[in-house]
Amino acid sequence: MMELKEQLKKALEELRKTNKRKFIQTVDLIINLQKFDARKDSVNIFVSVPHKIKDKKVCAFLEVKNNNVETITKEEFKRYSDKKELKKLVKKFDFFISQASLMPAVATTFGRVLGPAGKMPSPQLGILPNPDEKSIKEIIQKINSSVKIRTKEPSIKIAIGKENMKDEEIIENIITVYNAVLKNLPRNKENIKNIEIKFTMTKPQKIKLN
């Protein structure tokens, strides 16, 4: 693991030598897989990272409005029978949570668009049996410090940090995600070809794994 840390440190040093942009770039992690069938061996997990990457835009399906989160109540579901409205909704929010009792109605009304986008409220992180203030605040906190990993192809690409974070923080996030992915692959390290890191506007820096 020390060797991986050293390689990541060097890669970040190289990335920081590139031209400064007028915005804060995202740090992307790319894990390239091998001997991996995305349909048969798919990985679908949430990983809690030590350093928050960004505040995500969260939307909640609840019986009553809540001040901590943008809410769509059951009465408002009919507004979304129009597919255009649904598509706008999916683009606007990063994450959706739901009161457990509303899940059948959420699946019927929103499933056709949220499902393919990978944004359906999930039992892993997103379904609330009891949507009180404390539970909603806690779940939003968890969402903001988690990344979702879902394999659709033999390559995983996720935002892992921002360029204005410290190198150590970015490296800790990368290693946390790397270890979680490793645990969920059928052949462990054998399934990983290499990893790459990049900023939004740079070419990737390749990290070789022994």
Image: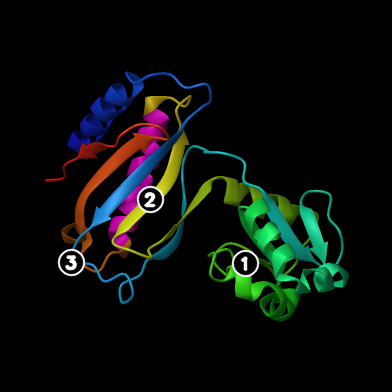
Q: Residue at x 53, y 38 (%)?
A: 52
* Image location (x, y in percent) of residue 193: 18, 53
For disc 1, the marked residue is 121
- Dot 1, crowdedness within 10 Å: few (<14), some or many (≥20)? many
Instruction: Place residue 65 in its image quadrant.
Output: bottom right
The tag earlier along the polypeptide, 1 or 3, is: 3
Q: Are marks 1 and 2 in contact (CB under 8 Å)?
A: no
Q: Quadrant of the N terminus?
A: top left
Q: Residue at x 32, y 47 (%)?
A: 30
Q: CA distance from mark 2 to mark 3?
A: 18 Å
- Residue farthest toward the front in the current orientation of the protein: 84
What is the three-letter code of the residue carrying label 2? Lys
Q: CA distance from mark 1 to mark 3?
A: 31 Å
Q: Label 3's element?
A: loop
The tag earlier along the polypeptide, 2 or 3, is: 3
Circle nearer the viewer, 1 or 3: 3
What is the three-letter code of the residue carrying label 1? Pro
Mark sitting on residue 35: 3
